[in-house]
Each structure stands twice: as structure tokens, then as C-alpha cells.
């Protein structure tokens, strides 16, 4: 009972701390923007007073100049642009390639050409490397979005974040299948 109460308290605390819609500060844009209009230049865009301007890029409502014309005060957000779908990621190709390579290594294990230890070591190394690349690229993207820190790399960070995420997910699925008896025993 104590564990359930502790988990509920932690979950509720997390929700209250990270609940979207709260403005913890006005006029604190990390990019130095002033009156940043909808949709905003970053992921931190928030508009609690519905004036079409990011709250982080303007002073508190009490400190604003009251001589602003009324049409400026009640801006209606512009329509969001239509996002064009493109096939820039290789989900199906990566998934099929990994399944084929896994099938081949599994077959080599069954034929006795490689040991089960070598088979699992190879896939665990792949799991670890894909996790590291995915995690580091995620941190780089978060630094760019949240703090405006842009580290220029000779490749597209978002592309490789998504691609390694696909690989990581597939390899995590293989790993899950290996350890399925362990996970089943948790629910007995």
C-alpha cells in the first residue's frame, strides 16, 4: 500500500511540475525574441492570455503598455502551415534489413557456425551503439530547441536521431524476445 501511495504521489508531482499551460515566467525568452507571434520560433511557445504572442517574449500583462491599439491586443493565431509528408526516413528498409540480418545470424547459430554467446554479443553491441547515438543526438536536439545552443555537425542530427531510434527499437524488440520468459515470470 505504501508503494502505491508513493507512486501516486510521484506521478501527481510530475504532472503538476511539468503540466503544460503554466507560465512560470514572462519576458524570459532564451532566444531573446520580443513579441514572438504565433506559431513561434521554438518549442517553448506558450500563449496563456490568447493574444497571439508567446508569453516568454513579452512582459507580464500588468507591465504592458496600455496605449497599444485594441486590434494588436486581440490577435487571432494564424493558421498553421500544412505539413508536407515526405518519405525521408527508412523505417521499412531498416526494419527488413535488420530482420534479415537477425534471421541469418539466428540460422548460423542453429547450424552451429557461431555460438549463441557470439550471436547475442553482436546484437547487444548493436543495441548499445544505437542507444548511445540516439541518446546523444536527442540531447543535441534538446539543447538546440530548449536553449538555442546549435552545434553545427556535418550531418542532419534529426535524421540520424530518427534512424538510430528505428534501429534501437528493432534491436530492443529482439532483446525483449530473448528475455520474454523473465518478463512473463514477473506477472505470475
Image: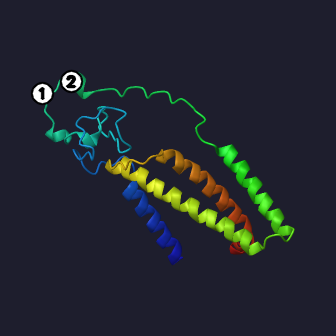
Q: Which SS class for mark 1?
A: loop
Q: Which SS class for mark 2?
A: helix
Q: Residue at x 72, y 72 (%)?
A: 118
Give coordinates of residue 25: x percent, y percent: 25, 49
Answer with the quarter of the image where residue 176 lies.
bottom right
| Residue behind mark 1 | 67
Vertical comparison of 77 with 133: above or below: above
Give coordinates of residue 72: x percent, y percent: 23, 25
Q: Residue at x 21, y 44 (%)?
A: 27
Q: How many marks?
A: 2
Label 2 neighbour load within 10 Å: few <14, some 14-19, many 20+ = few
Answer with the quarter of the image where residue 57 lies.
top left
Regarding residue 184, the answer to whether it shows in the image is: no
Q: Residue at x 27, y 44 (%)?
A: 31
> In the image, is 114 to the left or to the right of 164?
right
| Residue behind mark 2 | 70
The residue closer to the viewer here, 144 or 67, is 144
> In the image, is 162 to the left or to the right of 108?
left
> In the image, is 119 to the left or to the right of 4?
right
Vertical comparison of 136 with 62: above or below: below
Amino acid at each position: 500500500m505504501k508503494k502505491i501511495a508513493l507512486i501516486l504521489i510521484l506521478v501527481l508531482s510530475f504532472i503538476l511540475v511539468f503540466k503544460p499551460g503554466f507560465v512560470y515566467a514572462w519576458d524570459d525568452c532564451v532566444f531573446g525574441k520580443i513579441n514572438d507571434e504565433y506559431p513561434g520560433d521554438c518549442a517553448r511557445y506558450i500563449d496563456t492570455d490568447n493574444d497571439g504572442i508567446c508569453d516568454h517574449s513579452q512582459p507580464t500583462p500588468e507591465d504592458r503598455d496600455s496605449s497599444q491599439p485594441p486590434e494588436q491586443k486581440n490577435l487571432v493565431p494564424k493558421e498553421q502551415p500544412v505539413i508536407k509528408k515526405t518519405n525521408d526516413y527508412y523505417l521499412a528498409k531498416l526494419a527488413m534489413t535488420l530482420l534479415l540480418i537477425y534471421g541469418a545470424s539466428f540460422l548460423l547459430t542453429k547450424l552451429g557456425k557461431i555460438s549463441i554467446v557470439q550471436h547475442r554479443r553482436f546484437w547487444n553491441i548493436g543495441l548499445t551503439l544505437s542507444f548511445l547515438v540516439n541518446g546523444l543526438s536527442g540531447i543535441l536536439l534538446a539543447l538546440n530547441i530548449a536553449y538555442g545552443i546549435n552545434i553545427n555537425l556535418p550531418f542532419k542530427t534529426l535524421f540520424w536521431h530518427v534512424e538510430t531510434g528505428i534501429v534501437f527499437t528493432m534491436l530492443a524488440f529482439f532483446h525483449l524476445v530473448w528475455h520474454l520468459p523473465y518478463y512473463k515470470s514477473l506477472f505470475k
